[in-house]
Image: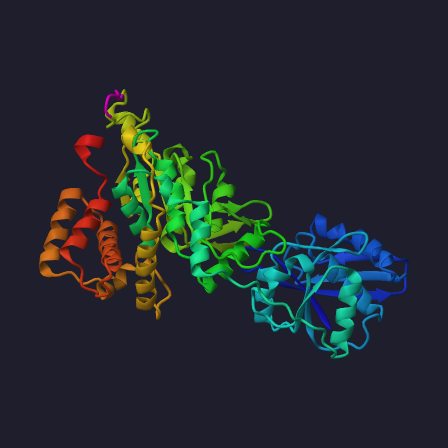
Amino acid sequence: MNIISYSPGGFEGDIVSVEADLRPGIPGVNLVGMPDTAVKESVERVRIAIKNSSYDFPGKRIVVNLAPAGIKKEGASFDLSIAISILQKSGLLGENREYKIMVLGELQLSGVIRPVNGVLSAVIAGQVEGVYAYIVPEGNIEEALSSKAERIYPCSHLTEAVDVLKKISEDILPDTAYDLKPQNSEKEEFKDHIKENPLSDIKGHEYLKQALSVAAAGMHNIILFGPPGSGKTLAGSRLVSLLPDLDLEDSIEVTRIYSLAGLLKNGSGLITRPPYRSPHHTSSMEGLIGGGRNIKPGEISLAHKGVLFLDETPEFRKSILQCLREPVENGKVYLARAGKNCWFPADFQIVMAANPCPCGNRGKDDSVCHCTDIDVYRYWKRVGGALIDRIDIRIPVMPVESEVLTENNNDSGEEYYKMVQSAVDIQKERFKDFVYKRNSRIPPSDCNMFIKLSESSKDILSKAVKKFSFSSRAVHSVMKLARTFSDMKGNPSVDIEHESLLEAIQLRRYGDKDFFW
């Protein structure tokens, strides 16, 4: 059997072959192949775990090679594969066959196998490599089964792993009767995510709720600006409650990212709800974009297929915000580090919240704004025009009357959710033969295919471009928004009505310039 393991590195990672050689000489173990400190320390863990599992540790000179040698091996997931490789070479596992067996797991001194990160990515990479069977920690079984791969064997102790490999070597395959947990019904799932993030918390603000539903339906980026206490943060955090569940492909991608980041709980299966991430404005570049010594996914990748909420956006470092432009446009983030280039998915829906000015009082009744026009310009310059231009929806948010806040709100958000779900279903059918799935992701080259404007609509759009100084990106943004408005009205036709186009133009503009700016 060819024992292989997996080295995480970006979204895809690398398959690692684990080979052992025993020869006469002074007893000892040499580990070669660019192992990091954690992998080097595995030698003593493996030695003691083998002895405590009632096996004889070979009293010979042992060399363990982790190939390819040019890739740095990191983490503790190589423990079990190193132990199995040594036991196989000592003759414990019987006849050798040309099977590729992926072995993952960290060993305790007692021989107990601990869960590790990145198991789902490892199994998916193993499927491409033609792996015959997989030995994974019992705590990672649900995650591994999410890949739909065959012959996945969960083990909780080194002795169990040895028994499974003996049966594989003898072609006596052990039982693998593990089933994924059944999914809840649509009604139960809706109740679950409404309970976690109820839209009913937003009182008043009907126009804001409609804007949130449009953003959710088409996966459009949105910015909320207004005085402190007007409800921006609350509204931004509630957008995720309107999003439909992830399909299988997206669910696997999101689960892989969380597994690589070490954020997937033991025993967890696929993540079925869109993620929601809200990093603090003091976050570092590596924390938001990704990277670090071991290259982990950042907040923008953890928000993949979900929502990235940036509260108090102008307070984030300008250099960090400018790094968001490419991921917002491309749906991926590419990281180049010394000796390593990798990428992570980052197709997220960005939600920004900001005050209209540094003091926050501009446009607020019965308040005085002490900010000059230059102060306001510098404040918004932190966000940058290039990033702002990638935001489809801009909503001014003003405080509601106290009488509205004290009223009982029986609106659970179910009506908005159903409207969003209906629009998403229309888009799935429309884009079933394309790589993109939502209106906001239509490339400029395909806009005319899915969005037809009459001559009068083109005239309206042309006037809006001149009045609001829309860029070419903004023109396509308005067209996509109009497409989403039509979908929410149940109109699958590619022809766009005047009403949808006018509503889209209104959402794209900043708001009444005389009032806010």
Label total for image: 0
| Residue 220 in sight | no
Q: Quadrant of residue 405?
A: top left
Q: Residue furthest bottom?
A: 171
* Residue 491 shows in this picture: yes
Q: In this view, does 452 lie to the left or right of 328?
A: left
- Residue 419 against residue 277 in the figure, above or below: below
Whole-percent x, y for residue 61 in the image:
86, 61
Q: Foreground residue, 194 or 303? A: 194
Q: In which quarter of the image is the N terminus?
A: bottom right
Question: Which quadrant would residue 385 be assigned to in this image?
Answer: top left
Q: Which stretch appears magenta?
A: 365-369
Q: Does the magenta stretch include residue 434?
A: no
Up the image or down, 75 lies above or below 451; here it is above
- In this picture the colour scheme is rainbow
- Residue at 28%, 39% in the rendered image: 205
Q: Is residue 203 above or below residue 302?
A: above
> Image check: 207 left or right of 174?
left
How far from the left and from the top, in percent, is residue 351?
Answer: 37, 44
Name the foreground residue: 391 vs 321.
391
> The C terminus is located in which quarter?
top left
Q: Position of residue 451 (x, y in %)?
A: 21, 62
Residue shown at 54% from the left, 60% from the top:
12
Residue 163 position in % (x across, y down): 78, 69
- Is 313 placed left or right of 512 in the picture? right
Magenta region, main secondary structure:
loop
Is 366 inside the magenta-drawn segment? yes
Name the residue located 32 percent from the left edge and 52 percent from the top edge.
415
